[in-house]
Image (spheres, grey):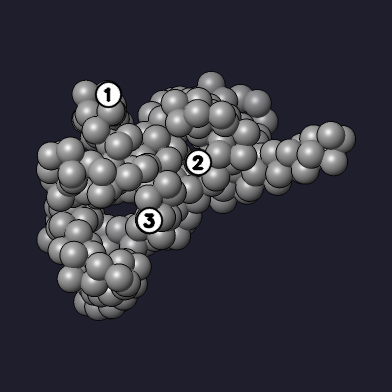
Amino acid sequence: MLEILTTDFFQRALLGGLLIGITAPLMGMFLVLRRLSMIGDTLSHVAIAGVALGFILGVYPIAMGLVFAIIASFAIERLRKAYKSYAELSLAIIMSGGIGLASILFTSGKGMQMNVSSYLFGYIYTLNKMDLIVIAIVTIVVLVAIGTQFKKLFLITFDEEAAAVSGLPVSFYNVMISVLTALVISVSIKIVGALLVSALLVIPAASSLLVARSFKQAIVLAVLIGEIAVVGGLSVAGIWNLAPGGTIVLLLIAMLLILLTVRKGFRLSK
């Protein structure tokens, strides 16, 4: 059973997972602290509509999903401005539209050969060279963007009003965070699936915030937790023939529960 760990498709899956294990928790940290945890679910449902259209048009599905997710990220920011006191409405509205459009497109393409389940629940073992190239490009874009704009993003994340007063183009950075998130989600849906991708964004951030003592430390821990979950989840799924996306998510939840227990025990011992 261990032979699967040395196969080409597993090596491709591991590489793709390691790259997403960096970018998803990294973006997730900004989203959690800005109370936008549900944006992952919203953009993933819109992206799956793009995937469906890609199948119908005979276009690379992930590319079409990426386009849809980016458009949705702009729409979310527009609606957030319209509903300043009810910002979460923007997520609900866009997600509803994404689900509705996806259902229509999948129904329209019923006669076509669509591998829907691999995009809904993820199937990382089907990653090909094109997928890895796209994932690598997105990883580089995210790391460069966050690395060069870290201080400004930090200020906007913790105090948007102060950032605006200091002269920072808050709208630009809000859109930037949404677009980067859209990129990460679009390339993640084949790894953990549209229905589970939010977990890879949110749970590592939630886990790291339990024990981290600074923002930078929280980011490092979130990425570390994401990588452990990807490598461990893929290995367990490969050896015991389990669904890789679901295994990764359950491992993330297990680590969160362990940290919660350890933290509670530490407090009781004081």
Is disc 2 placed on a helix, strand or loop?
Answer: helix
The type of residue carrying mark 3 is: Leu
Q: Earlier in the sequence, mark 3 or mark 2?
A: 3
Which residue lies under the disc numbered 3? 36
Instruction: For residue 156, say whether it is visible.
Output: yes
Instruction: For residue 194, say whether it is visible.
Output: no
Q: Is residue 191 placed above or below 39 in the rendered structure?
A: above
Residue shown at the point (56%, 36%) measured from the top left = 208
Alpha carbons under labels 3 and 2: distance apart: 12 Å
Is disc 1 placed on a helix, strand or loop?
Answer: helix
Q: Is residue 70 left or right of residue 40?
A: left
Q: State which quarter of the image contains the C terminus.
A: top right
From the viewer's side, name the closer residue of 192 and 113.
Answer: 192
Q: In the image, residue 83 lies at what x, y percent?
A: 24, 72
Tag 3 and tag 2, C-beta contact below 8 Å: no
Is disc 3 placed on a helix, strand or loop?
Answer: loop
The type of residue carrying mark 2 is: Ala
Q: In the image, residue 177 lies at what x, y percent?
A: 25, 44
User: Would you call the spot at circle 3 few (<14 residues within 10 Å), some (14-19), or many (20 or more)?
Assistant: some
Which residue lies under the disc numbered 1? 147
The type of residue carrying mark 1 is: Gly
Which residue lies under the disc numbered 2? 205
Tag 2 and tag 1, C-beta contact below 8 Å: no
Residue shown at the point (87%, 35%) measured from the top left = 269
